[in-house]
Amino acid sequence: MRDELHQPSEKASMYKAEIGRIVRERLSNTPNVVKVPSPQLDLFVARNFLTQDECDKLIEIIDSNRQPSGVLGPDMDPDYRTSESCNVNPFDPFIKQIEDKIANLMPIDRSHGETIQGQRYSVGQQFKPHHDFFYTDQPYWPEQERTGGQRTWTVMMFLNEPEEGGHTAFPEAGVKITPKTGNLLAWNNLTLAGYPNSYSLHTGTPVLGGVKYVITKWYRERPWGYSNADPMAFAAKR
């Protein structure tokens, strides 16, 4: 494998750093968006980003299409990711409205965005600590590099509030986010210098009561193309 797949060039890192700066500046100056205090991580919350009606309709879509979640790369732990997921139809007029709403917030060309994924967590289900960025020394990387390269930002939207548990936690950064219906959570998977940020490690903690629904959208450094990898396997782990 080419050395540059393991060590991004300075020019490539500067480009990804600029993406981070542009998004950080936009979110920092958007009403109703707050930065979560964390010196190691760019993490923002947009309050009431989705309406109750939008959340209810997205929950219906997830329930109609959900299947067991997967991971990108081999994993021997059956409890690593136990949720159910689905990729929503990007050509659905309602989903296009949601995409438009996200695009109006995130100053990244929408061609860089992956298909929105919906996730459902029932009692006991979880997603153990993982990074959204790709490990460039893994077998999956050449295909991911070909179809858009490294992930930059992640946006996650909470569609409901479980009765107990189901937090999104960033253990390395010392942050835990409580699900709040309609809120959007956005974070940079890379450092200020444009390299993978270990502090972006996050987990969907087990739901202890009720059910949790979210949708997630990931952005790449370049326009995202079709990948031969399992379309349900959107978690990069080592």
Image (tube, rainbow, N blue to C red):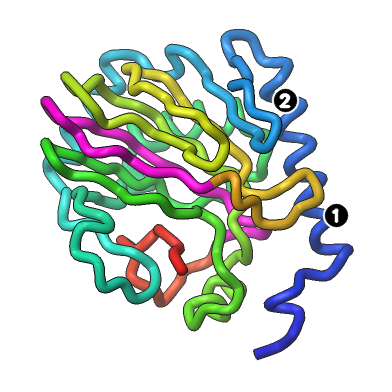
Residue 102 is situated, as x and y percent measured from the top left of the image, at: 52, 31
Residue 211 vertical placement versus 125 (above, below):
above
CA separation in Å, label 2 and label 1: 18 Å
Q: Does the magenta segment cover residue 211?
A: yes
Q: Does the magenta segment cover residue 36?
A: no
User: Circle 2 — which element?
Assistant: helix
Q: Image check: 11 left or right of 80? A: right
Q: Which amino acid does label 2 sit on?
A: Arg
Residue 238 or residue 87, whichever sits in front: 238
Q: What residue type is labelled 1?
A: Met
Instruction: State the residue at coordinates (44%, 64%).
Output: 237
Instruction: State the residue at coordinates (48%, 78%).
Output: 140
Q: Can residue 144 be seen in this view?
A: yes
User: Circle 1 — which element?
Assistant: helix
Of labels 2 and 1, the one closer to you: 1
Residue ID for mark 2? 26
Residue 39 is situated, as x and y percent measured from the top left of the image, at: 70, 30
Question: What residue span does the magenta drawing correspond to?
Answer: 201-224
Residue ID for mark 1? 14
Q: Can residue 111 be seen in this view?
A: no
Residue 108 is situated, as x and y percent measured from the top left of the image, at: 66, 41
Residue 158 or residue 238, whichever sits in front: 238
Residue 135, quarter of picture: bottom right
Instruction: State the residue at coordinates (81%, 50%).
Output: 193
